[in-house]
């Protein structure tokens, strides 16, 4: 083998190692960014099932599929190029935009709390407001409304991801890879979970009514006219109980998911604003949150790390709730009328 060929192979191996290291770095950054976007993700999963409420069960999965495709377009075709352009042209604008998104999360979370305590007419029906028309027209309206709402949530996810990546690397391609990976994985995870949630009650009903769970492979095939066998009779009570549990439990699960989503929005939104203020030299609130968390952790040293994280998250959530409460009259009485007038 010639020396030149050996040198070429050595160069290729070196490039492969660099590429592998870059991919590993991108994977790590994608995981960290995805964790930071958890609040938006949970709320997205809690809100989306509302868009198929009142529609035919046979159209639930196709609707979620259409929303998933729209969400991927939002992230990969519109928001990804915009985020990369922002990181190249105006990186200084990332933190203010992120804080603006955090304020939006605080407002949304506070609005949900306000609605729960003092029910009132929704300012923007998240599930889509029914209008007169055919089922196809209603479906089209629901899908369009879901994709429009997803654009806002996706923008916040991409902004959080961009801020995380920008802190860790200056590589344009690493940023592009991480943004694409986070956007794709989160979209598929969220809407995959939504599909399972939406169809869980149907699956539960099928299990509760199935006398031949083994013969029918849990309803995946027709058992024919044969009587249930011994395995069916043995497993039947378990699968029927599971089915009834799904039917009864899903409404409560959705309520819990909504509460968790609201809390996560306030925590993430408040934390984003606090971190942004620290970057602008206004670190008083951040120091106060850190001090409260450390004091609580010292008092419960056996579970110090968990307590510190929980208290810091709770304090950020309370701050986010206060910010959101202050924004409610401003948004509802000033911003929304202006937007409505502009649209008309």
Image: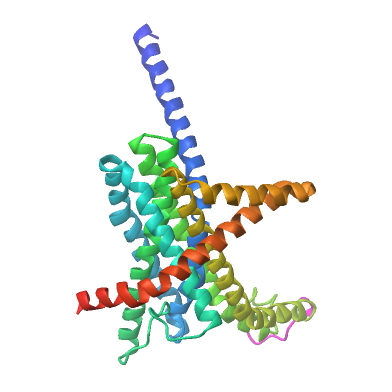
Q: Quadrant of residue 2?
A: top left
Residue 100 in view in this figure: yes
340 over 309 or under it: above or below: below
Q: Say whether residue 155 is left or right of residue 200.
A: left
Give how far across and how far down residue 226 sits, in percent.
69, 85
189 over 334 or under it: above or below: above
Prevalent SS, magenta region: loop
Residue furthest top in the image: 3
Give how far across and how far down residue 72 sits, in percent.
36, 59
Residue 220 in view in this figure: no
Give how far across and how far down residue 81 sits, in percent.
28, 49
Q: Is residue 150 magenta?
A: no
Q: Say which of 148 and 328 sits in front.
A: 328
For the record, the magenta segment spans 221-231
Q: Say whether residue 39 is left or right of residue 298.
A: left
Q: Say whether residue 218 is left or right of residue 281.
A: right
Instruction: Kindly identify the residue that appears in the image at 60 percent across and 81 percent down.
Output: 251
Residue furthest bottom in the image: 132
306 over 234 or under it: above or below: above
**Quarter in which the N terminus is drawn:** top left
**Quarter in which the C terminus is drawn:** bottom left
Give how far across and how far down residue 69 sits, in percent.
36, 64
Q: How is the image coloured?
A: rainbow
Instruction: Kindly identify the residue that appears in the image at 61 percent across and 73 percent down.
Output: 256
């Amino acid at each position: 083998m010639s020396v030149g060929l050996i040198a070429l192979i050595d160069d290729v191996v070196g490039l492969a190692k660099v590429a592998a290291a870059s991919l590993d770095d991108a994977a790590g950054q994608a995981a960290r960014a995805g964790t930071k976007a958890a609040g938006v993700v949970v709320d997205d999963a809690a809100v989306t099932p509302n868009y198929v409420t009142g529609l035919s069960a046979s159209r639930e999965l196709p609707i979620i599929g259409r929303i998933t495709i729209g969400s991927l377009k939002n992230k990969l075709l519109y928001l990804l190029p915009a985020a990369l352009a922002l990181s190249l042209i105006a990186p200084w604008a990332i933190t203010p935009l992120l804080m603006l998104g955090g304020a939006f999360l605080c407002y949304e979370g506070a609005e949900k709390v306000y609605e729960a305590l003092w029910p009132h007419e929704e300012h923007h029906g998240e599930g889509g407001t029914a209008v007169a028309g055919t089922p196809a027209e209603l479906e089209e309206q629901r899908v369009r409304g879901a994709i429009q709402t997803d654009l806002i949530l996706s923008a916040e996810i991409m902004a959080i991801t961009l801020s995380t990546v920008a802190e860790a690397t200056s590589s344009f391609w690493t940023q592009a890879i991480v943004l694409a990976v986070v956007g794709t994985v989160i979209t598929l995870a969220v809407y995959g979970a939504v599909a399972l949630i939406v169809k869980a009650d149907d699956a539960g009903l099928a299990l509760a009514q199935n006398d031949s769970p083994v013969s029918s492979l849990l309803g995946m095939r027709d058992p024919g006219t044969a009587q249930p066998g011994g395995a069916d009779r043995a497993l039947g009570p378990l699968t029927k109980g599971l089915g009834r549990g799904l039917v009864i439990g899903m409404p409560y699960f959705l309520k819990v998911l909504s509460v968790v989503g609201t809390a996560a929005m306030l925590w993430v939104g408040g934390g984003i604003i606090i971190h942004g203020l620290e970057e602008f030299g206004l670190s008083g609130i951040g120091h106060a949150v850190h001090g409260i968390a450390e004091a609580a952790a010292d008092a419960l040293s056996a579970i110090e790390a968990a307590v510190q994280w929980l208290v810091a998250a709770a304090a950020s959530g309370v701050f986010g709730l206060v910010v959101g409460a202050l924004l409610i009259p401003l948004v509802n009485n000033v911003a929304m009328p202006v937007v409505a007038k502009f649209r008309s």
